[in-house]
Structures are given as C-alpha cells and as structure tokens.
Amino acid sequence: MTGVRVLLTGSTGFVGRAVLSRLLRARGADGRGVEVRAVARAVPAATGEWAGVEWVRADLSDPASLHGAASGTDVLVHLACRVSGAAEECERTNVGGTRAIVDEARRAGVGRVVHLSTAAVYGPGPHRGIPVDGVVPAPVSAASRTRLAAERIALDAGAVVLRPGLVLGPGDRWVVPALGELLQRVPGRWDGGHGQVSAVDVDDLARLVTALVTAPDSGAVASGVHHASHPVPVRIGDLMARLAELGILPSAGPDDWAWETCLARLRETPGRMSERQFALLARDHWYESEQIWRLTGCAPGPGPLERLAGAAAWYREHLRAG
C-alpha cells in the first residue's frame, strides 16, 4: 500500500521548493509517507534533497507533454505560474498551463486540487481586514489578471485556492529586494511606517499546503478561495526595522515622511519599482486570513517577522550578489 500520491507543479520555484521539502517529510493520516511526482521543464538529479521524487519532464505550455502525468495520483498541487513578463507569456503559462494540468488531473480521476494564487488579484488598495472577495478583484498587471483567470479554471475543478500576500523567506527574490530598492530611492519611514500588509513565511505556507494534502477528509476545507497569509498583519515600519536589525537592509532612519513626500521622492529617482508596487508594499493591504489555518488544524506559527532570523543569511548573500 502507498501513501498519498501528489502531482506537484512549480517544484523548483520559490514556494515550490519549500512545499516539496515539506511533502517529502510528511505523513498521511494513515501514517504512510507522501509520494511526489514533480513536473518540471528541466529535471534535476533525484539525489540529495530531491531523493525519492519521481520527476516528469513536461512543459505547462505544451499540453501534449503532460499526457499521463497525473496517472495514479490522488492530489494535484499546482504552484507553477508566471509572476512577470509579457501578457501573452502570462496567458500561456497561467491560463493555458492551468487548464492543461487541471484537464490532465480530471482525466486521471484526481480527487483533490490545491491551487496557489495571490492576494495581488485584488489590485490597488488600500485594503484593511478584507474577507475573501470582500472587494471585487481588480488586478492591474498581466500576471495578476491571468492568475485570477487561472483561479476560475481551478475552482471549476473543485480546487482549494490559496491567496497569500507577501511571501518571505529563503528564495524570495521580489519582496525584500524591492524594499531595498525603494529604501534607496525613498530613505525615510514611509507614511510613518504605519501601513499594514498581509505576509507569510514561505515554510509556514508550505506547511499549510502540506496540511491540505495530508488531511484525512477532503471535505474539511471546502472548495473555494482562502486567504493564506499569517492571521496577524505586519506593520511595514516593524518589517523594515527587523530587516535592519538583522543586517539585511539599512535602517530607514528616524524621519517620518508623508505619503505625498514619498511619492515625490520616488518620482525624482527612477528605478525598477513603480508607484503602484510601492503602494502595495508600503500602504495597507491586509486580508482576513485566520480561517484556513483553523480549518486545517495547522498552527500559523509565530509570524514572518520572527521567521526572518532564519532567512537572514540567505537574504544577505542574495542582496550582495545582486
């Protein structure tokens, strides 16, 4: 007899690596382990940290390459996505790829689907304590628009869809690097540092995904959308202070800058990050996220600020190399 058999996409990405690591150490309700079949365009050697993984070379943008990938599996965990790029690339991967892997899972009779999305589908805020779809999603970027479209495909297949906010931890090449650039361009406490954001440590998110995979009752968490950040939002001033304390980013200094002053300074110093992205990181964007942790019986942990110490060495090395 085998344990839970999982088909995993996005296994070599930021969140996917953490989820794969957790799945390989997990046990199902019957005490048996989790078997993982991982889809990837470039298959790594199944040794070391990947020992025990069954790799399938396939491309989400090529539906024919997925034929048979879901055969014999119980759960589809779909994490693969494009988070940037041209509209047609996002459409091909996020929409076409989701449709292809979900269709393959349906043909194979897979009984459970977990799909990773993002709270960025809500678009510009400010958002404060919003329940699921408490505001109408209004995505701005091509990546977010196509990820919202991908949600609909997954939901039609009965998926549990997770919308985390900012994801922090080893492998994060967007949030903290973006904060570092913005701090260089706007070297003060943005809007007094009062903005609150939904955030989650990547390993805590991986624990949540694993709890959904190994739950003995597939009906314990109903099909639908769930916010997947830590239940307690993070104050941006506290996040910046913690990053400085750990030597990851320089201190923001003692000066409180009004929001209009921040925007004026941002416009004077061009860079990669847009005003919209600045607002997403610096102003209120937080969403009610307690329910999914309660339903799965998965403790959310101490929160992303406490988890940062374990990621500090990775961040310092990554930012030096960048």
Image: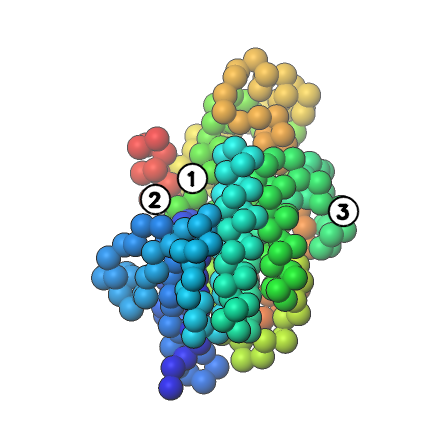
- Please say if the residues under marks 2 and 1 sit with CB atoms less than 8 Å apart: no
Q: Position of residue 306 (x, y in %)?
A: 48, 52
- Mark 3, Cα crowd under 10 Å, few <14 / some 14-19 / many 20+, is few
Distance in Å between CA atoms under marks 3 and 2: 36 Å
Q: Of marks 3 and 2, which one's residue comes earlier in the chain?
A: 3
- Mark 2, Cα crowd under 10 Å, few <14 / some 14-19 / many 20+, is some
Distance in Å between CA atoms under marks 1 and 3: 28 Å
Label 3, on which residue? 135
Which residue appears farthest toward the top when viewing the image?
Answer: 268
Q: Of marks 2 and 1, which one's residue comes earlier in the chain?
A: 1
Could you say which quadrant of the image residue 226 lies in?
A: bottom right
Q: Position of residue 253 (x, y in %)?
A: 52, 27
Residue 229 visible somewhere in the drawing? no
Relative vertical location of residue 220 with respect to residue 101 in this rendering, above or below: below
**Which residue type does callout 2 highlight?**
Trp
Q: Is residue 53 left or right of residue 137?
A: left
Could you say which quadrant of the image residue 172 lies in?
A: top left
**Mark 1 residue element:** loop
Relative vertical location of residue 252 with respect to residue 28 in this rendering, above or below: above
Per the rendering, the mark at residue 173 is 1
Question: Which residue occupies 59% across, 36% down?
Answer: 142
Q: Of marks 1 and 3, which one's residue comes earlier in the chain?
A: 3
Q: Nearer the viewer, mark 2 or mark 1?
A: 1
Label 2, on which residue? 314
From the viewer's side, name the closer residue of 110 and 17: 110
Q: Position of residue 74 (x, y in %)?
A: 48, 74
Q: Is residue 258 left or right of residue 187?
A: right
**Mark 2 residue element:** helix
**Which residue type does callout 1 highlight?**
Arg
Q: Position of residue 129 (x, y in %)?
A: 72, 50
Quadrant location, the C terminus: top left
**Which residue type does callout 3 highlight?**
Val
